[in-house]
Image: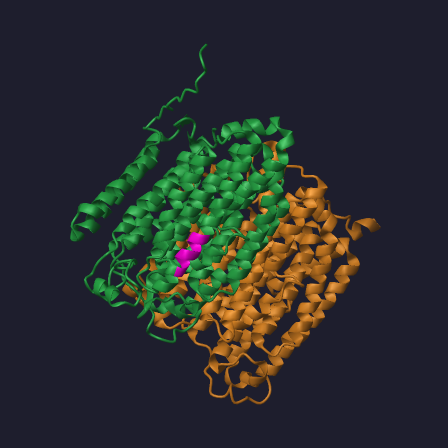
Chain colours: A green, B orange
């Protein structure tokens, strides 16, 4: 008698459709080899070459894949319209972010990262490394893995793949956040906080995943979605699991009450990294969260909607009210990013195709504006490094009119003024939510937007209407890397505000998640 | 060929390009050249306006003429649609005339190194306001409605006097709150159009045929009305205006009160009434009450003001009351009168503010009590101020008289008691205008006044178009009414109202 054996079928992998992130992860490995074998003086140019080539290749692949809808790698990865769009946005954000990270003219002693992260702050080692003009080129390895993780995160189609992607994305960022060249203790403290709280949230996610597996018997989104209506007796277990997973995700998108790490990390991390992180992680985490709640838990909308409703409200208002009283520009922008997380969640709650498109648009718009504003913050410096105290921005308009004008434009975009991408983004989110009968939430969101205008404009008032009290603060002249990154961010903010139709056309062609 | 020129779009884009030019390279151009570029653009825009006006046919069947429409954001059914009717044309005239007049009067207001930004902001303002007055797409209107705040905010906050920062922020917050409430209304209306017709559109004519139920109309009316009442402004959401006017230079104050605030009353006629006709009729008593309150509150506060700019701001609040009164009286005459009032108020604001501005510039004070007896020293200036004051109190023979009279006549036909009550406002108006003149111009010259020079040729030339128009329209108001009457008839049709039988007819 034959004993039936469990045969392990090797899943077939369509390497072509998963190439956007495999290119990056592969490049990460190559980058590690460069760190090991290349001469110190060659590392930076080689790494930069590798980073930009692989990112452009990844972006090109997303363009080639446009319109593809397929499951691969044993249904662990879902390549679909929103997934490809998110991957493309992440690649673009990473290219601009990398340009920002590559900046080495603004700080007289090198780029934004410590000459050698292992040197104890204030030690003679540190001084020696700095004087030798060393760079921490391993940031590029970390960077590539983080971007690869983000791209996998948004197409992961089961809970385990999603978790692994989450970690691949997060771990390098925890490290990089602690590697600032200046104010290193603050940076290391931020990294530690980020890591500890991030680890907690991962634990929530895992625990939730275990409960959902227990309730549905599957980790694949299709299995979960299929099992949910068939097992009503498991609903308590299931909903608890969903809530725990959502807690893990809400941590990553930085919504209240899981936002506590945001201001510390945004402030402590090197500003150019903050720029990339604020944009990239937001895109990736919202992308993944959208897939999760629409694809796996779509039929539970009546359970998660009230929960997200409450979280959205808290997020928006914590964001705008706390931002009002900040005295550090990076902390203020951190709270503003929390508020924006709330606005994006308004779209998530609508639970419609229009909602998906509006979120994708919002993420694109927000990513470019955020990159731009943080890169500008990194240029405003005094003798000790960045001058991120809001008061030190007094009279900036008379010191550098073009910087002040750029900041004003981006602030108006964040505030949602017409003819900036921020307005169209908010408009489409609110429109999708009103279509989904969420008018009260939209009214509250509009109220929050009104409050938000106050702190964005405070910066404008300081720059234009106040006199500078000292000549210490000045705008550094950056290298072409930053200039190109800034021009692209600002242009995108303008173009998406004036003529957004092409992007909507692209997004509308395949707005459906597959599973 | 000339008939097919996209006049209105050019009028929007030309000042915009001009503003970008002077913003981008102010130092390369130099102050003198910036001024000549700006005035050349104002001249071309005015010429375009005149050409456009000549092609305008008074008795055309279509509501809008010189229409252009291009797809913009098809995802939301947004188009770049422009067109004018009689009202739009008159408002265009106001903008294209007043902006250069004001800047000519403010020739020396800003230092040479700030000229680039100042003219850049003014060009931008003109472009945006023109767009507001010609937009026939609600989304486009909203975009430019909000955008108006940006140049105005900087004009007050950067070039103003006294507590300018606070005033600028107050102006901005009030307007933004109004704007965001309007945004909620605009989006909801769009969603309604999507639900009812499955076409999401912002086209004005399309939206006005939706046939919304009264419940929805009421909510949307309130949202739109709040936004427009803040802009106009009406009591009790007026308090930003006196502060903003006090902290602005006279030139900026004219742009603010004479032009920008008209957007509020203009939008009531263009959007509020046609889009929500039943709710407008139902809620008209609220609007009428606020209008009457504004008339008296503004007038009384004006009498009590110590600062001349504040005084004039309160006078304007009182006048906006008259305009809104005319609109919501729902008679052809009342609405025509209100529209005429909008134009004539722009003129009288310019005349009074700029003339008083000349005086304040010379004495360096805007307190009424610092001035006395200026008539003996600067008779010509005193004459200008007297003209401005009388224009403001609606002396017969001036355009403002026709405006006020028509509004009251129109209101009387439907609400005789209210009209009688509002007429008392005219009496109070005489008090503040004459007091202002008496306290500053007559008597023994004060220290501040002695030694100042009379107005220069440039200053008189700047005001002359305003004075001329005030007189011409005062004697031949039919020029404007021919344009405006079809519009007001159309509005009456849209809100399905008919004029109450005239009293004289009743006796027959």
- From the image, give the main secondary structure of the stretch colored magenta: helix
Left or right: where B268 falls relative to B99: right
- Residue B363's place in the image compared with B49, above or below, is below
Residue B419 in the image: state x and y as whole percent: 75, 60
The residues colored magenta run: A189-196
- Residue at the limit of the structure toward the top, as seen here: A1
Per the image, is A296 magenta? Answer: no
B117 or B90, which lies in front? B117
A294 or A399, which lies in front? A294
Q: On the image, which quarter does residue B214 sit in?
A: top right
- Residue at the limit of the structure toward the front, as seen here: A1
Residue B58 in the image: state x and y as whole percent: 56, 45
Residue A21 in the image: state x and y as whole percent: 34, 37
Residue sitting at x 24%, y 68%: A124
Does residue A18 show up? yes
Residue A126 in the image: state x and y as whole percent: 26, 64
B64 or B161, which lies in front? B161
Residue sitting at x 60%, y 37%: A237
């Amino acid at each position: 008698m034959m004993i039936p054996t469990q045969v392990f079928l090797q899943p077939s992998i369509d390497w072509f459709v998963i190439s956007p992130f495999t290119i990056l992860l592969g490049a990460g490995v190559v980058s590690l080899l460069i760190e090991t074998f290349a001469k110190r003086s060659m590392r930076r140019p080689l790494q930069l070459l590798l980073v930009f080539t692989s990112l452009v290749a990844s972006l090109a692949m997303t363009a080639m894949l446009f319109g593809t809808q397929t499951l691969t790698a044993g249904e662990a990865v879902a390549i679909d319209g929103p997934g490809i769009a998110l991957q493309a946005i992440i690649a673009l954000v990473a290219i601009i972010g990398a340009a920002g990270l590559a900046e080495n003219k603004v700080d007289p002693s090198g780029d934004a990262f410590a000459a050698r992260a292992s040197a104890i702050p204030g030690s003679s080692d540190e001084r020696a490394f700095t004087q030798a003009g060393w760079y921490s080129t391993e940031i590029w390895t970390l960077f590539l893995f983080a971007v690869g993780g983000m791209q996998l995160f948004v197409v992961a189609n089961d809970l385990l793949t999603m978790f692994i992607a989450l970690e691949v994305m997060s771990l390098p960022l925890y490290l990089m956040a602690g590697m600032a060249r200046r104010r290193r203790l603050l940076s290391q403290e931020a990294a530690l906080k980020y890591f500890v709280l991030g680890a907690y949230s991962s634990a929530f996610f895992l625990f939730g995943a275990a409960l959902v597996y227990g309730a549905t018997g599957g980790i694949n989104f299709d299995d979960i979605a299929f099992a949910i209506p068939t097992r009503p007796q498991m609903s308590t277990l299931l909903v608890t699991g969903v809530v725990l997973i959502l807690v893990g995700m809400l941590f990553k998108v930085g919504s209240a009450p899981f936002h506590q790490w945001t201001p510390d990390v945004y402030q402590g991390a090197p500003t150019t990294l903050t720029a990339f992180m604020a944009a990239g992680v937001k895109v990736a985490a919202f992308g993944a969260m959208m897939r999760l709640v629409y694809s796996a838990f779509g039929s539970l909308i009546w359970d998660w909607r009230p929960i997200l409703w409450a979280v959205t409200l808290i997020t928006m208002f914590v964001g705008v009210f706390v931002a009002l009283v900040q005295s550090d520009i990076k902390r203020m922008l951190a709270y503003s990013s929390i508020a924006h997380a709330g606005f994006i969640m308004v779209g998530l709650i609508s639970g419609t195709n229009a909602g998906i498109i509006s979120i994708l648009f919002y993420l694109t718009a927000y990513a470019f504006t955020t990159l731009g504003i943080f890169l500008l913050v990194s240029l405003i410096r005094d003798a000790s490094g960045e001058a991120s105290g809001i008061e030190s921005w007094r009279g900036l308009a008379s010191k550098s009119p073009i910087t002040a004008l750029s900041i004003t434009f981006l602030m108006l975009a964040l505030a949602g003024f017409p003819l900036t991408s921020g307005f169209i983004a908010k408009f489409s989110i609110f429109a999708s939510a009103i279509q989904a009968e969420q008018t009260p939430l939209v009214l509250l969101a509009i109220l929050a937007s009104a409050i938000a205008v106050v702190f964005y404009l405070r910066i404008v008032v300081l720059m234009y209407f106040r006199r500078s009290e000292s000549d210490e603060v000045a705008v550094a002249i950056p290298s072409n890397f930053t200039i190109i990154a800034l021009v692209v961010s600002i242009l995108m903010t303008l173009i998406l505000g004036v003529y957004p139709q092409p992007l909507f056309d692209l997004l509308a062609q395949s707005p459906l998640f597959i599973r | 060929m000339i008939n097919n020129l996209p006049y209105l779009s050019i009028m929007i884009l030309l000042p915009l390009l001009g503003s970008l030019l002077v913003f981008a390279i102010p130092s390369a151009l130099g102050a003198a050249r910036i001024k000549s570029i700006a005035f050349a653009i104002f001249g071309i825009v005015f010429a375009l306006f005149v050409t456009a006006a000549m092609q305008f046919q008074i008795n055309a069947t279509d509501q809008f003429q010189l229409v252009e429409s291009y797809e913009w954001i098809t995802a939301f059914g947004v188009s770049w649609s422009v067109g004018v009717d009689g009202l739009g044309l008159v408002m265009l005239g106001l903008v294209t005339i007043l902006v250069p007049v004001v800047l000519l009067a403010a020739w020396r207001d800003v230092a040479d190194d700030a000229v680039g930004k100042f003219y850049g902001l003014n060009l931008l303002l003109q472009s945006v306001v023109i767009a507001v007055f010609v937009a026939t797409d609600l989304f486009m209107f909203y975009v430019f409605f909000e955008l108006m705040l940006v140049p105005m905010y900087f004009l007050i906050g950067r070039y103003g006097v006294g507590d300018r920062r606070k005033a600028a922020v107050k102006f901005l917050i009030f307007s933004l709150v109004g704007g965001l409430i309007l945004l909620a209304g605009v989006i909801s209306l769009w969603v309604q159009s999507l639900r009812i017709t499955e076409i999401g559109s912002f086209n004005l004519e399309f939206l006005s045929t939706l046939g919304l139920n009264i419940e929805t109309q009421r909510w949307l009316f309130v949202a739109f009305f709040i936004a427009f009442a803040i802009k106009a402004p009406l009591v009790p959401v007026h308090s930003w205006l006196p502060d903003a006017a006090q902290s602005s230079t006279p030139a900026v104050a004219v742009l603010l009160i004479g032009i920008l605030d008209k957007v509020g009353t203009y939008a009531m006629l263009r959007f509020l009434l046609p889009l929500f006709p039943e709710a407008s009729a139902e809620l008209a008593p609220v609007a009428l009450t606020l209008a009457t309150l504004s008339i008296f509150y503004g007038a009384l506060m004006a009498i009590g003001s110590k600062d001349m700019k504040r005084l004039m701001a309160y006078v304007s609040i009182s006048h906006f009351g008259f305009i809104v009164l005319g609109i919501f009286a729902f008679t052809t005459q009342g609405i025509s009168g209100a529209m005429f009032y909008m134009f004539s108020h722009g003129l009288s604001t310019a005349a009074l503010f700029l003339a008083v501005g000349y005086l304040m510039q010379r004495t360096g004070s805007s307190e009424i009590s610092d001035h006395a007896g200026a008539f003996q020293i600067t008779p010509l200036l005193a004459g200008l101020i007297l003209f401005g004051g009388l224009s403001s109190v609606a002396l017969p023979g001036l355009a403002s008289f026709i405006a006020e009279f028509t509004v009251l006549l129109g209101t009387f036909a439907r609400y005789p008691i209210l009209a009688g009550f509002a007429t008392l406002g005219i009496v109070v108006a005489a008090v503040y205008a004459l007091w202002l003149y008496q306290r500053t111009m007559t008597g023994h010259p004060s220290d501040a006044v002695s030694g100042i020079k009379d107005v220069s040729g440039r200053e008189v030339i700047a005001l002359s178009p305003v004075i001329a128009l005030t007189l011409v329209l005062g004697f031949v108001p039919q020029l404007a009414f021919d344009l405006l009457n079809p519009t007001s008839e159309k509005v009456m049709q849209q809100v399905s109202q008919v004029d109450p039988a005239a009293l004289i007819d009743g006796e027959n």
